[in-house]
Amino acid sequence: MGRQDEKRRMRYCRLGRTELDVSIIGFGCNQIGSGNIGYKDFGAAKDAIFQAIDEGVNYFDTADVYGDRRSEEWLGEILGSERKRTIISTKAGLTGDGGRNGHPDHLKCSLENSLRKLKTDYVDIFYLHRKDPEVPLAESLGAINELVQEGKVRFGGISQLDLEDLETVKNNSTVSCVQYCLNVFDFQTVYSVLPVIKDKKYGLLTYSPMASGWILKKKYYRLKNSKFPFLCHGYYRPEFPVYKEVCKLADECRVKINQLALNWILSHHDVDSVVLGSSSWGQLHENIKALEAEIPSELISRLNGIIQKNMFKNRPIRNIVWNIGLKAKRLLY
């Protein structure tokens, strides 16, 4: 999957077997319109989107439930005539309150609402956001296929499907793209499905490269330097051992951890685009600039060694303490 250089730092990649050439960084719109964090102000969202376009970003990833259900509407309003120069994906299948709904009628209705909000007559990619255990997967994908046939969707996709389910749909022509979480803390699922992705030539888009910001948490920096880290709550987070080793590697090689984390993801040649969520343009721009960092292949190999080592490492005491903490939190709150 070749990437081509542009006058900007941005590069582009053909998305699997589709006809779409996506920027290797996508704009994650999950915080657009959010009432809690993120781009609560329409003007800030507009500035960020157009600055991202100026940087070469052409792929925008949203969903019906993002941004307190305002993300699609804001994105459509902001893009306007720029929509023709962009690639938009949206999703349906989550209810926004922890539930799932993969019923064909719901997916079709949701897509109609998305088109209205996005001010467009088609979307480039329409994902089943998550599998609904109450609805056969074939039925959900059948609805997406109908939408493709009607010209309202260019390509169908699925998000975060496990290996067993992906195996059952690998001969379904509806699926052209897949989306998975991938970062230095969360890699097991995507690693397990990579053989199928390669075999079927699916377009692979990943999200949460900074683990929802945990990779950048300043309290982790303090924790790793603490004389008594085992007395701190964060010490027992399952990903902390990986974080500590990755930080040490980044410090040793004098690179920022976000530069190392993002370039490690893009070193996977099957990854076509990384969707970056953000709560401000400054945050997004900092991660786009990470593409300029020259990360030696030897550094990526050392990071791969850390990942492989921690894939199978068992830490029973740490896991027991962490699980007790989770149960206590549920009881208290």
Image (cartoon, rainbow, N blue to C red):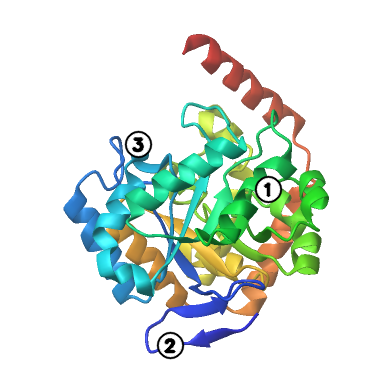
Mark 1 or 3 closer to N-term? Answer: 3
- Few, some or many residues within 10 Å of mark 1 (<14, 14–19, 20+): some
Q: Which residue is mark 2?
A: 6
* Above/below status of 60 relative to 85: above
Name, please, the residue furthest toward the top: 331
Q: Are marks 1 and 2 in contact (CB under 8 Å)?
A: no
Q: Point out residue 167 in the picture as x, y percentages from the top left corner.
A: 82, 51
Nearer mark to the viewer, of 1 and 3:
1
Callout 3, which amino acid? Asp
Task: Determine whether the residue tagged by mark 1 lies in a helix, strand or loop.
Answer: helix
Mark 1 or 2 closer to N-term? Answer: 2
Callout 1, which amino acid? Gly
Mark 2 or 3 closer to N-term? Answer: 2
Q: Which residue is mark 1?
A: 142
Which residue is located at x 52 percent, y 34 percent? 234
Q: Which residue is mark 3?
A: 68
Q: For residue 106, which quarter of the picture?
A: top right
